[in-house]
Amino acid sequence: MQPEVQRDFTELVQRHAALWYRVALRIVLDHAAAQDCVQDASIKIWANWTKFRGEAQRSTWAYRFVVNEALSAKRRARPEANADPSELAGVPDSPYFESDSVLKALYAAVAELPEQQRLVFQFRYFDELPYAEIAHILGTSQGGLKANYHHAVAKIKKTMVGLNLDLHSES
Amino acid sequence: MNLSTEPHKRRDGIHVPDDFAALLAERATRAAVAAEQRHTRMRRLTWTAAAVAAVFAGVLLSVRPNSAPAVNSTMQLSVEEAWTALEQGEVTLTDDELLELAEIHGITSL
């Protein structure tokens, strides 16, 4: 490809690698697997670079590859690797994850959610993404996302009764 | 662009150091470009192999001997078939040939 196209790609990766890592880590919950997801997603982003049609921001389009890669990696992972009966279930295993008991409890509660609700909650609460952008990433409607977020927040609040968490409950 | 790339938003408790992010980006970029080069090389090899195979097949077809069955100029007939052909006037034999044929096949009455 043209050198300027490669430069654009390199800039995109440099700007978003940390964010992609965080997104992937929250899904696969493993430091090494999250790095693999970023790398594999980058390969696919570059391979599909010319197929971008501009329906969303280039970075939103790329975000989708990372999410899909992380979800695929999670599904490929052996079931016993995901089955963690300890209180740390759903908590990322990474040297860059720092948490207190409240955040750990929040992660554990999020892990109990169905996949779509979990993703919407993470994008909305952790990343503060607007629904329009989440809709592009997940390829779904904003109405459905709002309903999923509403259900997710309700379930998490129920799980975390007594913990003073500032959860947005807008719908 | 609404996706935050700023490190101050760490609601998820994940704090990615700049040096790790830079290393991750470098690895990802390198892997992507290397994968594309591998893909291009594979595609070129595939096309080359297909072209060579096509040329080889063409040469093979052009030098291959005709496989159609050769026409056999001699034909084996049974006595009955020969006799029937003679009776129907499809072949004409001289008297000597007729006697010889009768003698060979043990025909005593003509």
Image (tube, rainbow, N blue to C red):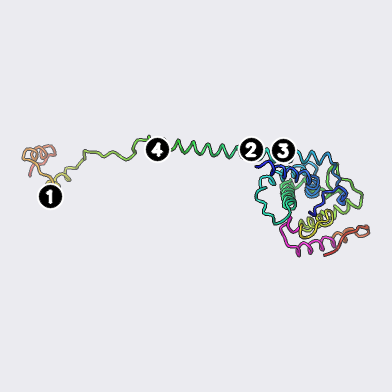
Mark 3 → mark 4, Cα distance in angstroms:
46 Å
Which three-letter amino acid code belongs to the residue tagged 1? Gln
Question: Gap in Å between the C-alphas at discs 3 and 2?
Answer: 12 Å
Residue position marked by numbered label 4 in the rendering: B61
Callouts 2 and 1 close, C-beta under 8 Å = no
Task: Judge the density around disc 4: few (<14), some (14-19), many (≥20) Cα neighbours within 10 Å.
Answer: few
Q: Which residue is drawn at 79% across and 63% down?
A: A146
Task: Tell me which chain the residue with mark 4 is part of.
Answer: B
Q: Give the range drawn in magenta.
A: A134-154
Chain of the residue under the numbered disc 1 shown in the image:
B
Disc 1 from disc 3: Cα separation: 91 Å
The percent coordinates of residue A78 (x first, y second) are 74, 46
Q: Specify few, some or many for label 2: CA neighbours under 10 Å numbering under 14, 14-19, or 20 or more.
A: few
Label 2 SS:
helix
- Identify the residue position indicated by label 2 in the image: B38
Residue B93 locus on image (x, y percent): 9, 42
Marks 4 and 2, how far apart at CA: 34 Å
Of A54 and A134, the residue lying toward us = A54
Q: What element carries label 1?
A: loop
Q: Which amino acid does label 3 sit on?
A: Arg
What's the amino acid at mark 4? Leu
Give the CA distance from mark 1 to mark 4.
47 Å
Q: Which of marks 1 and 3 is in front?
A: 3
Of pointers 2 and 1, the one earlier in the residue sequence: 2
Point 22% across, 38% down: residue: B73
